[in-house]
Amino acid sequence: MSCDNFCGSYTFSIKVYGCQMNVCDGDRLRSAMNSLGWRESPDPADSDVAIFVTCSIRDKAEQKVISELGRFRPLWEKNRRPRIALLGCMAQRTGESIARKFPWVQVIAGPRHLGVVPEAIASSMTDDRVRFHLDSDPRELEDLECLPQTRGNRHKAYVTIAHGCDQFCSYCIVPYVRGRFRSRAPEGITDEIGRLIEDGVVEITLLGQNVNSYGLDFEGRLRGYRFARLLSDAAAIPGLKRLRFTTSHPIDFSDDILDVMSRRPNICPSINLPVQSGSDRVLREMNRKYTRGDYLGAVEKIRSALPGLGLTTDLIVGFPGETEEDFLDSVSLLERVRFDLVHSAAYSPREGTPAAARRDQVPAGERARRLAAINGLQSDISRQINKSLEGETCHVLLDEAAPRGEGLLQGRTETDKVVLVRAPNEMTGTIRPVLITGSSPWCLEGRLL
Ligand code: SF4
């Protein structure tokens, strides 16, 4: 639906958990509520509706939301406000039981129903009926057509290019809560990017659970329009300074994507290529559909096409049945590839996935030990890589004030490394040459040139 056919003069707060897709949904929803005349309040307890955009990827993320919801009981019993809108993956997965437990949750909508949420929130002010908008078919989609004008960051924006995922990795809840893979038409994407540039955006990140599969589901006039073509068309939009994308799946990272990346200087040389495990046996049981050798081959091809690339990965330790030998395969893969950054996690069982039903779960203490070992190793690798950048000049998009440190701005290199620079606030939103003067495993320090 369009976001301009239901008006009100209420206040809302919004809290976003989880991935960048949720951040993007939160920004679109915020903009839609503003365009209905609603004002954002920083305090959920002082708003008419408190919106939670939730995540189901780990049990911890869900438990945090449950404990937040519980705190609203006294306010609800006293004032009948705030009403709660529970959105996103957790709403899709557990919405019905949440509604039974917390009657102040008045709107429950899965991630594929964001388009009906503004109207559902507005109408929820009129009665105490719970409004459910959950998938009855994992292919249905009620998207919200609204430019994310009210963004967490003025200079950067996310643009969703595809919804859902068809890969069914055995540990992952995403296909069950975000539904089947569906690509957005390219015209809608390029139009949105053009309007975001007019609104002052310098850097766009194209988002999808698996961006490389973009277009695989197109029929008719769009058949054959794949991710490489979208990247090329997006990069050619006048005024776009930086273009990124996430997340990639190793099985679909085709040569034409590398070709476009090497020809278009405004596509940042930075790739997140989740490996998840270094052991062939575990990869097979994860249903990842590639081997360690395939992955290493893809890295070699990518690095030779894009020298100087920033390469990051996602890795799970303690997957059911993971032996010490399997774990050491992951260790040796990290030592061999030397990623810039590893998003590591101890395996967290998600009810309803095949891996969660296995009897050979690795004990929590052992999962924690393996995670600490991986983090220690990667911290050393990242420290060495970042140290080697000292003395180099990087182009940094200064995008916001640093969280700590008076007069410091925070920015990102083209390879997606965080840099802290002493610079005036007016430089926010500009790309500047910066000399790297210091480093740690997690960020760089620099001086404006
Ligand atoms: S590719 Fe696998 S891990 Fe990624 S969202 Fe799809 S099912 Fe989950």
Image: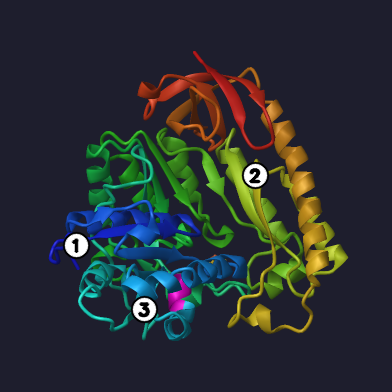
Quadrant location of the N terminus in the rendered image: bottom left
Disc 1 residue type?
Cys
Residue 375 placement (x, y as % from top left): 75, 49
Residue that carries the numbered disc 3 in the rendered image: 139
Label 1 CB-ligand 1 distance < 8 A:
no
The amino acid on which the numbered mark 3 sits, given as a three-letter code, is: Arg
Residue 7 in the image: x percent, y percent?
Answer: 14, 63
Looking at this view, is 68 or 86 the one in front? 68
Q: Which of marks 1 and 2 is in front?
A: 1
Answer with mark 2 or mark 3, whichever residue precedes in sequence. 3
- Mark 3: few/some/many CA within 10 Å (<14, 14-19, 20+): some
Q: Main secondary structure of the magenta part?
A: helix
Is 255 above or below relative to 135? Answer: above
Task: Report the coloring of the rendering.
Answer: rainbow
The answer as to whether callout 3 falls within 8 Å of ligand 1 is no
SS at circle 2: strand
> At 51% across and 38% down in the image, what residue appears?
269
Asked whether, in this view, residue 77 is left or right of residue 278, the answer is left
Residue 3 is marked as: 1
Residue 392 occupies quadrant: top right
Instruction: Please give the name of the residue rendered at 52% of the width and 60% of the height, measured from the top-left corner.
Output: 252
Give the spatial CA distance, label 3 vs label 1: 22 Å
Rendered position, 319 above or below 45: below
Q: Write the start and end of the magenta stretch as one range.
A: 88-92
Q: Residue 341 carries which label?
A: 2
